C-alpha cells in the first residue's frame, strides 16, 4: 500500500486559514503539549514504548515523557469487562502527570496497537474527535531500539497525538491546527510508508481521516468534506481486514462527526447533513453498544440529542424533540452524578430545557415538572456560591415554568413559586449590573403578579 498515492490524490492544498497566522513565529515560543508514553504491554523483551517516546520528542510542540513504573496492563485487551479499569487507570495517570495525552501501546501478534487517552475524552468537548477505542496499528519491528520509523509513519503517529489533544484555549486551538496543517503537508509529499502491507489499510485510513477532520472541521468547503469522507469510506471498504467490531464502530462514529460538523458549518442543504450524522451515529452505536462500550455510546447519544433538537428547530417535528429527550436520558444513565459531575450537570440543564419545551407544546404538567426537577438537579453542581450568574439563570428558567403552569389554571401556589424564583434571579442580576436580564425579569415579575391578583 502506497500512502503517497492516496494522500496526494485526496489531500488537496487549502487556502489561508487561521492557523497560518502563526506559521512564521519561532516554534520555541509556541505552547508545548504534554505527552506521556506509558511503557507498552509487550510479550517480548523490548523498549518499544521508549522508542516511540524518543521519536515523538523530536516533534514540534510536544513535551514528551516516558512512564515505566510497573503495573498490570491486562486491561489493554480492550474487552468490555476491563474497559473501566483502563479508563480509571488512565485518568489517574492523567491527573498525576498533568498530561494532555496518554499513549498506550499493546502488542497484538506482529503489530503494536496504539491508543490515545485524554482527560475529558468522553465529556462535552468539541474539536477533538479521537476516542480511546480508536486504534492505530503499526508493525512491531518499527518500534525496536533503533526506531526504524518511515517518515510517513512517524508523522501519522504525530498527527494522531495532535488530533487527540483537547483544549479550551483559543491560542492552543490555533496552534493545534497549525501543526496539523504541517503534518498533512508532509504526509502529502512522503512515500516512505510504501512498505506497509494492506492489512494496515483501515486503521491508517481511519487516522488519516481523523487528522484531516481535526484540521478542517470548521471549513465550509465541500472539497474538504469529500476528502475526509473518502478516507473513512475507504477504511470501511476494507472492513474485512478489521479484527474487531469496535474499530468499525469508531469509523462510523467519525463519519457521524464529519456530517455533524458539516451540518453546523455548511451553508447548503444542512438537513441532508443532519440526516447523515444521525444515520452514521446510530450505525456506530450498533457496534459500540451501551452495555459493552458505554462511554462511547453515551457520548454519541449526547450528540444525537443535539442533532435531533436542531432538526426540531428547523422542521418543528415534535417527534424529533421527543427523540432528543430520549437520547439525553440515555446519556444521563452513563454520565452519572458520582463519576462525571460537571458533564452530568450539563446534561441536566439540557434536559430541563428540552422537557420544558416538550411540556409546553404537549400541555403536560407532568413533563413540565420533570423539567423543573432536572434544573434543580443541575443546581446540585451549579450552586449560588460557586457560580451565581449560572445559578440565577437556572432560577429564572424554573420561574418561567412555574409561571406558565400557574397561569394555565390560575394556581396561586405555582404563581407565588414563580415570583420567588424570579426574585432570586433578579437579586443576582441587579448586583452585577446585567441590565437586559433585569428588564426581562422585571417584566416577568409584573406579569406573574398581575396573574396572581386575578387568580
Image (cartoon, rainbow, N blue to C red):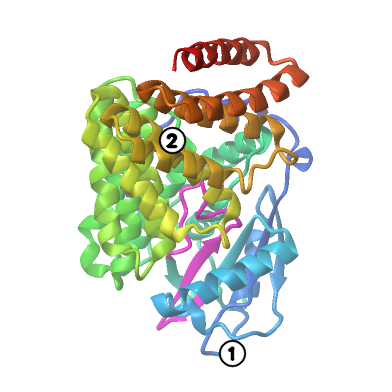
Q: Residue at x 60, y 23 (%)?
A: 422
Residue under pointer 1? 45
Residue 9: quadrant of the picture: top left
User: Circle 1 sits in a helix, a strand or a loop, which is it?
Assistant: loop
In the rendering, at what x and y percent does residue 3 appear? 37, 54
Which of the two marks, 2 or 1, is nearer to us in this view? 2
Nearer the observer, 328 or 364: 364
Assess disc 1: are there few (<14), some (14-19) or many (≥20) residues with their C-alpha within 10 Å of its C-alpha.
few
Nearer the observer, 118 or 301: 301
In the rendering, at what x and y percent does residue 301 appear? 36, 50
Q: Residue at x 29, y 57 (%)?
A: 285
Which quadrant would the N terminus be assigned to in this image? bottom left
> What segment is highlighted magenta in the picture?
106-135
Looking at the image, residue 288 sits to the left or right of residue 449; the answer is: left
Give the CA separation, mark 2 to mark 1. Answer: 41 Å
Looking at the image, residue 25 sits to the left or right of residue 323; the answer is: right
In this rendering, does residue 9 appear at all?
A: no
Residue 111 located within the stretch drawn in magenta: yes
Which quadrant would the C terminus be assigned to in this image? top left
| Res. 71 mark | none
Q: Disc 2 vs disc 1: Cβ atoms closer than 8 Å?
A: no
| Above or below 66: residue 179 | above
In the rendering, at what x and y percent does residue 329 appear? 38, 51
Q: Residue at x 35, y 39 (%)?
A: 367
Residue 110 located within the stretch drawn in magenta: yes
Amino acid at each position: 500500500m502506497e500512502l503517497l498515492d492516496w494522500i496526494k490524490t485526496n489531500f488537496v492544498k487549502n487556502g489561508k486559514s487561521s492557523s497560518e497566522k502563526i506559521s512564521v513565529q519561532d516554534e520555541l515560543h509556541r505552547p508545548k503539549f504534554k505527552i506521556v508514553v506509558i511503557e507498552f504491554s509487550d510479550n517480548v523483551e523490548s523498549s518499544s514504548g521508549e522508542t516511540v517516546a524518543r521519536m515523538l520528542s523530536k516533534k514540534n510542540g510536544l513535551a514528551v515523557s516516558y512512564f515505566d513504573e510497573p503495573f498490570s496492563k491486562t486491561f489493554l485487551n480492550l474487552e468490555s469487562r476491563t474497559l473501566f479499569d483502563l479508563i480509571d487507570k488512565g485518568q489517574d495517570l492523567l491527573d498525576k502527570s498533568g498530561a494532555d495525552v496518554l499513549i498506550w501501546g499493546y502488542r497484538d501478534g506482529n503489530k503494536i496497537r496504539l491508543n490515545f487517552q485524554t482527560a475529558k475524552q468522553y465529556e462535552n468537548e468539541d474539536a477533538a474527535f479521537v476516542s480511546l477505542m480508536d486504534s492505530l496499528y503499526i508493525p512491531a519491528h518499527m518500534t525496536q531500539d533503533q526506531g526504524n520509523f518511515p517518515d510517513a509513519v512517524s508523522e501519522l503517529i504525530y498527527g494522531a497525538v495532535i488530533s487527540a489533544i483537547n483544549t479550551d484555549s483559543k491560542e492552543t486551538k490555533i496552534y493545534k491546527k497549525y501543526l496539523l496543517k504541517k503534518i498533512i503537508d508532509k504526509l502529502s509529499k512522503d512515500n516512505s510508508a510504501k512498505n506497509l502491507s494492506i492489512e494496515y489499510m483501515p486503521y491508517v485510513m481511519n487516522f488519516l481521516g481523523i487528522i484531516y477532520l481535526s484540521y478542517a472541521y470548521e471549513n465550509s468547503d465541500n472539497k474538504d468534506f469529500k476528502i475526509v469522507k473518502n478516507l473513512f469510506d475507504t477504511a470501511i471498504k476494507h472492513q474485512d481486514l478489521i479484527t474487531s467490531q469496535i474499530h468499525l464502530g469508531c469509523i462510523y462514529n467519525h463519519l457521524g462527526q464529519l456530517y455533524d460538523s458539516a451540518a453546523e458549518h455548511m451553508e447548503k442543504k444542512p438537513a441532508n447533513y443532519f440526516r447523515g450524522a444521525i444515520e452514521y451515529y446510530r450505525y456506530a452505536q450498533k457496534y459500540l453498544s451501551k452495555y459493552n462500550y458505554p462511554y462511547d455510546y453515551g457520548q454519541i447519544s449526547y450528540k444525537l440529542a443535539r442533532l435531533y433538537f436542531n432538526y426540531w428547530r428547523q422542521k418543528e417535528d415534535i417527534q424529533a424533540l421527543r427523540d432528543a429527550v430520549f437520547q439525553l436520558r440515555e446519556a444521563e444513565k452513563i454520565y452519572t452524578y458520582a463519576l462525571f459531575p460537571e458533564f452530568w450537570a450539563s446534561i441536566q440543564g439540557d434536559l430541563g430545557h428540552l422537557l420544558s419545551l416538550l411540556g409546553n407544546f404537549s400541555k403536560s404538567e407532568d413533563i413540565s415538572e420533570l423539567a423543573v426537577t432536572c434544573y434543580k438537579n443541575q443546581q446540585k453542581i451549579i450552586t449560588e456560591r460557586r457560580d451565581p450568574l449560572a445559578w440565577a439563570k437556572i432560577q429564572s428558567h424554573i420561574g418561567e415554568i412555574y409561571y406558565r403552569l400557574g397561569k394555565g389554571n390560575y394556581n396561586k401556589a405555582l404563581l407565588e413559586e414563580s415570583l420567588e424564583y424570579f426574585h432570586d434571579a433578579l437579586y443576582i442580576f441587579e448586583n452585577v449590573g446585567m441590565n437586559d436580564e433585569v428588564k426581562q425579569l422585571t417584566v416577568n415579575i409584573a406579569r406573574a403578579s398581575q396573574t396572581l391578583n386575578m387568580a
